[in-house]
Image (cartoon, grey):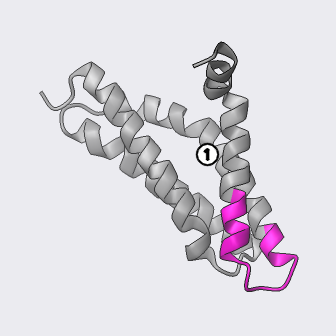
Amino acid sequence: MPDALKRLARSGTVHVLFAFLAMGGWAVFANRAYDMPRPLYSGLVQGVMSAGLTLFLKSVIDGLSKRFDGLTQLWAPPLIACLGSTAALVAIHAASGTPEILKTVAVPLLVSTSYATIYNYSISARRGAGT
């Protein structure tokens, strides 16, 4: 892989921008049946939330993984992160008037929970969790 591509792949700015565009785009799609500008507002809200979650999810998992030992370390941090993300997304979408909240948050939660689980497992494996 060329060095420039490696730098882009490691760039936090690129990850945040990708999260904003991908998950904001999903929210526009999920709410496409409603009159404009509601889908655009939903996309903006979800894009900003996904960018923020991308910034903070790694730090949350890093912190939570240190608080648990054994098998609990494998499932508790991603579960707590998922519940926190769900609460924040649903509350903010409800407050902003997103029509299709469940459809809007389903994909971002799947992606962020998958990331949290895989990342948590990778750092737990280094610490020897579950042994």
Q: Give the residue at mark 1.
A: 53
- Any part of residue 46 in sight: no
Residue type beneath disc 1:
Leu
The secondary structure that most of the magenta stretch takes on is helix
Query: Which residue is at a point 66% across and 64% down the rendered structure image?
Result: 26
State the image coordinates of residue 83 (x, y, percent, origin top left).
Answer: 45, 57
State the image coordinates of residue 112 (x, y, percent, origin top left).
Answer: 51, 49
Query: Is residue 85 shown above or below 13?
Result: below
State the image coordinates of residue 37 (x, y, percent, origin top left).
Answer: 87, 76
Q: Residue furthest front?
A: 1
Q: Is residue 36 magenta?
A: yes
Left or right: 47 as drawn, with respect to 107:
right
Query: Is residue 10 shown above or below 86?
Result: above
Q: Nearer the viewer, residue 43 or 70?
A: 43
Query: Which residue is at a point 37% across and 51% down the rendered structure image?
Result: 79
Q: Residue furthest right?
A: 37
Query: Which residue is at a point 37% across and 35% down the rendered structure image?
Result: 120
Q: Secondary structure at mark 1?
A: helix
- Any part of residue 96 in sight: yes
Query: Is residue 3 shown above or below 68?
Result: above
Query: Which residue is at a point 75% across and 64% down the rendered structure image?
Result: 43
Binning the other alpha carbons within 10 Å of mark 1 as few (below 14), some (14 to 19) or many (20 upward) gives many
Q: Quadrant of the C terminus?
A: top left
Q: Which residues are magenta?
A: 24-41
